[in-house]
Each structure stands twice: as C-alpha cells, then as structure tokens.
Amino acid sequence: MTKAIRIHETGGTEVLRWESVDVGAPGNGQVAVRHTAIGVNYIDTYHRTGLYPVPLPAVLGVEGAGVIEEVGPDVKDFKPGDRVAYAGGGPGAYSERRLVSTAVLLKIPDGISDRDAAAGLLQGMTVQFLIRRTYPVKAGETVLWHAAAGGVGLIACQWLKSIGVNVIGTVGSDEKAELAKANGCAHTIVYTREDFAKRVRELTGGEGVPVVFDSVGKTTWEGSLNSLKPMGLMVSFGNASGAVEPISVGQLAAKGSLFLTRPALATYVAKRPDLERAANELFDVIGDGSVKITVNQSFPLAEAAQAHRALESRGTTGATILLP
C-alpha cells in the first residue's frame, strides 16, 4: 500500500482525501515509479471540480518525477534506478508511488533536477507546442501572453526572449509585474487596474498583436480579441477564470477575420516522436540556461488541498510542486 490524494466526488478542496491505495505490480508497458516530486497544474483543479470529468474514485495529478523501482515484463528501454518524468497519461500523480505507461515516460537528463522536471515538464512542453507549432513565433514579433507571472508564463517569457520575441504580459499585481519583467517580459500590464486591450494597442502603434496566448479564459476573452490585429490568432488554452461562454463565429469576422484555436498538450504529444521532440527542446533550453524553472511554492503531498487553494486564489507565481 502507498499513500495518495484521492477524490470520491467532485467539489472544492474538501473532497481531497489522504488515503492508502494499492498500486500493485507493473504490467506490460508499465513501470513502477517512486515519486520524488509532483507537479501541480490547473488541470488538477478541473479534475477535482468536475469541469474535466474523470472516473471516480481518482488519484489526482498528471505530472511527476522520480525513480523507477520495477519494470513490467516487456519493458526494454527503461530499468530500475532510472530517473524519469512524465506529463500526461491520465491522473494518478498525487501519490508516493504509482504505475506509469512507458508511452508517456521520459528519462531526465543529467544536470536537470527531479524538482525542475516535475515542475517544468507539462508547463514547458505546453510552451513548446504553443510557440513552435500552434503559432510558430518569429524573432521581432510582439505577442500578448496572459498570466505572465504564472508557471507557464515565466517559461514562455524566458523562452520567447531568447529567440528575440517581445512579450507583452498581463499580471495581477505590481509584484507579479516585476517577476515577469525579471524573466524577460518586455512590457507588463496590471489587468486589475488597466484596460489591457487599450494598452496593447498603444504599445503596438494601434496595430494590435498577431497572436494572443490566453490561459485565463472568461474574464480576458473580449479583451484578447480586441488586442488582435486583423487575421490574428486567438489561442485559448486554459480556463483559470472560468470557461469561455459560447460565441457567435460572426464575432470573429467583425473583429477582423480572426482565427481561433483551443489546443491541448495531449493532442500535440500523442505520437511518441512529437513527445520526445517537445521534451528534448525543453530540456535543451533548460540545459543551456535560456530557461530557468522557477519553483516558488512547495507543499507536502498530504497538504495538496492547501496547494489547490493557493493556485485558485491566484496567490502563486512560477511553479508549484508537492513533495512525497
């Protein structure tokens, strides 16, 4: 038996239970991983509340790092003692030990810590697919990135600056503005007191930006559309403030023949070569110092509820991890 955070019904943080679970032995295509660090992401709160339904009861968490303790009978590319990480493959990370499919498993390169891997893999691969594939950003372009001081935002600001891109970032406070600037954000807008769409127009000489990366959702939707230049791309990849309400496609035409996409990491890394490409590009920019993973909050695994409350209150910056 091992300890894990499990839910039996959806709801607030009160549904998170610290329980003993039976992990069992790995089967074909599986390994048993002893976690050393576990990533906390907004999708975990969506699973907890039921916004993204999962079969119940469920152990939460989709990202972790640790050491392989045992491999399944047909596993050849991994062995006990390997340092590994994963981001995806279904919930189950909020546990001291779990079984993981080798289809989503990655070896952690030397020089990268387990904590950085657990904190940065999902968020970093999200940045990779957004700026390399959803909208291949070019040097000299200016983009708008919401929640620039969050885990994904800080990675994005650093990565985009390293390739010569100007980032306009929205944040919720002056403290977060300073953090975003320190990580490469060219211009910050405190959205709680400033009309960010108006400010984006001012910063771009009235043109707007070619792309908006928006993980906030409901509260930033209209302003995001108003920040785009004609034929710009709205990338809506999260719902931190709530789901975007149904829209009329005519709205996209009225605001300048805009494009809209709602991408998900799982789609972009569904094929093993794409997963390895995303992870390798991330590990490369971490390895050469272009991107530093900022872990500003850590909690004992048993206190996952506190981590969720901090995340949902917008009280966090950078990445948050749980420690078994």
Image (tube, rainbow, N blue to C red):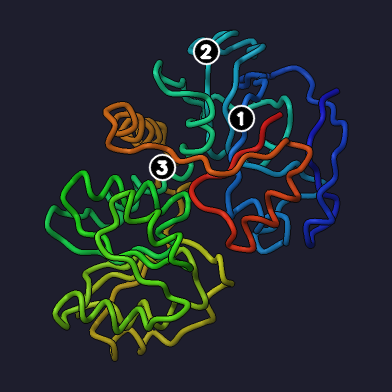
Q: Mark 1 points at which residue?
A: 37
Q: Distance between the residues labelled 2 and 1?
A: 19 Å
Q: Give percent across and percent down for residue 122.
A: 48, 42
The residue at 78%/56% (across/down) is 13
Contact (CB < 8 A) between labels 2 and 3? no
Q: Give percent across and percent down for residue 220.
A: 45, 76
Q: Mark 2 or mark 3, which has the lower sequence index?
A: 2
Quadrant in which the N terminus is drawn = top right
Question: Is 227 on the left or on the right of 321, as rendered?
Answer: left
Question: How many residues crowd mark 1 within 10 Å: few (<14), some (14–19), many (20+)?
Answer: many
SS at mark 2? loop
Q: Nearer the viewer, residue 184 or 53?
A: 184
Label 3 or label 1, whichever lies nearer to me, is 1
Q: Nearer the viewer, residue 226 or 295?
A: 295
Q: Which amino acid does label 1 sit on?
A: Ala
Question: How many residues crowd mark 3 within 10 Å: few (<14), some (14–19), many (20+)?
Answer: many
Quadrant in which the C terminus is drawn = top right
Question: How many residues crowd mark 2 within 10 Å: few (<14), some (14–19), many (20+)?
Answer: some
Q: How far apart are marks 3 and 1 (CA)?
A: 16 Å
The residue at 81%/49% (across/down) is 16
SS at mark 3? helix
Label 2 or label 3, whichever lies nearer to me, is 3
Relative to 173, does residue 183 appear above or below in the rendering? Answer: above
Relative to 274, does residue 148 appear above or below in the rendering? Answer: below
Q: Give percent across and percent down for residue 106.
A: 47, 25
Q: Which of 303 and 65 is in front in this view?
A: 303
Q: What residue type is labelled 2?
A: Phe
Q: Give percent across and percent down for residue 205.
A: 14, 79
Q: Mark 3 points at which residue?
A: 124
Of the numbered discs in the image, which one, if any, rests on residue 78? 2
SS at mark 1? strand
Relative to 273, does residue 24 appear above or below in the rendering? Answer: above
